[in-house]
Amino acid sequence: MGTLPLVEKAGHFLKTAGVTDKRYMVRMAEIQQEIQETGTYTHTKAELEEGARLAWRNAGRCIGRLFWDTLTVVDRRHAATAEEVLEEAVEHLHEADQQGKIQPRITIFPPEQPDGTVPFRFLNHQLIRYAGWETAGDPASRKLTKEAEMLGWKKEPGPFVPLPLIVEEAGGRRIFRELNPGLDFHEVSLRHPEEPAFQELGLKWYRLPVISDMILEIGGIRYPAAPFNGWYMGTEIGARNFADSFRYDKLKACADVFSLNTKSTPSLWKDRALVELNRAVLYSFLEDGVSIVDHHTAAAQFDLFEKQERKAGRQVTGDWSWLIPPVSPAAVSIFHKQYEDLPASPAFLYPDSVQG
Ligand code: HEM
Ligand SMILES: N/C(=N/c1cccc(CO[C@@H]2CCNC2)c1)c1cccs1
């Protein structure tokens, strides 16, 4: 798809979106005309909405695709300043949370221009994430924390200091906006269903995962600022964010809470600590009434997605290595199946990828 002319990418998209016959001919003539005059074309609201939903349906690494056609699409292509983009991003946080009953939502800002100019982009990987220093916080955020400090952002290092939103305009100007805990975003304090001592670990995490550094590509048009959220799968927090040695590295501390024998590898103390950490994540989110899915339920939902896609005559593409959960992977059906990881369009892409 990368090298095809824009008008052919537009045609492929319309067909994927089910536009046929007369409507296809009329719309393609309009698009052809606009491309000839301006070098690009403008999606209708309906095309933008369907395109974003198709990009989710095509996301081969996503286990949560069953709900692809419930995505709420917010058209903010008219945003004219970085200040406006920041305000709309905070609005996204307020609107998607719904007091914990999380709504899958995407806000779409202006597209890349024909000459490749990017009007706005977020420097944040996710709209909500904790800062990182050598001595404290999320190691995954160390680079962005330094960039924020270069812009004048200054905070006392700690484990859960929210990073500011940072937007970069075409031409390189960067502005940032602090996020206020309890107002702009909400957190869940982690406790264990059976072990009261667990809360002494002092762990908490934010409720809303919003990816803000991927490019949404629809019919050859690229949207470099299009933050999207779903809800978490518990393992993301319990088996990666808190468990990875290069993240919060809490397995040993968790094992000590349960007095596990951490001197004996074959005691499987790491595996037992992982399970208890993941049980605490799921228990705490659910008790607070916040949307979250366990990896068994998520895999069962993905099974339904596969059936639904086969029934619709579509091949299910997937990246097996991402679709299997990091806890008990062989206990879910995905592990015992094979998936072709084919590029598709519409799609969510990484910035440096040429595809699309
Ligand atoms: C509704 C609940 C959702 C759940 C539980 C879910 C779950 C996940 C998980 C667990 C991953 C792998 C992340 C990792 O291993 O770091 C993932 C990847 C992904 N998801 Fe979903 N997802 C959901 C909704 C969405 C939505 C709404 C979109 C976009 C509209 C989306 C697009 C993607 C994409 C593009 C990836 C791959 C990211 C990459 O390549 O780095 N997901 N999802
Ligand atoms: N639950 C989620 N999980 C993720 C979905 C996509 C990407 C990520 C984080 O990916 C990072 C890049 C490589 N691993 C971490 C997490 C969602 C975020 C936004 C919508 S659903």
Image: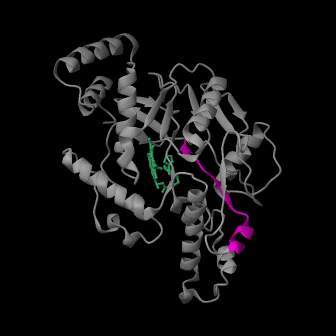
Residue 354 makes an appearance in the image? no
- The colour scheme is one colour
In this rendering, the count of numbered labels is 0
Q: Quadrant of residue 73?
A: top left
Residue located 41% across and 69% down the image:
329
Let me know if residue 180 is in the magenta part.
no
At 34% across and 36% down in the image, what residue appears?
2
Up the image or down, 278 lies above or below 21; here it is below
Q: Quadrant of the C terminus?
A: top left
Magenta highlight on residue 207: yes
**Of residues 38 and 228, which is closer to you in this image?**
228
Q: Residue at x 69, y 52 (%)?
A: 142
Please state, as top left, top right, bottom left or bottom right, where the N terminus lies in the image: top left
What residue do we see at 31% from left, 51% from top?
305
Direction from residue 121 to residue 185 in the image, left or right: right
Q: Residue furthest right?
A: 156
Front one among 171 and 122: 122
Region of the chain picked out in magenta, as a range: 196-212
Q: Nearer the viewer, residue 282 or 54?
A: 282
Q: What percent of the width, then of the height, locates residue 316?
A: 27, 51
Quarter location, residue 271: bottom right
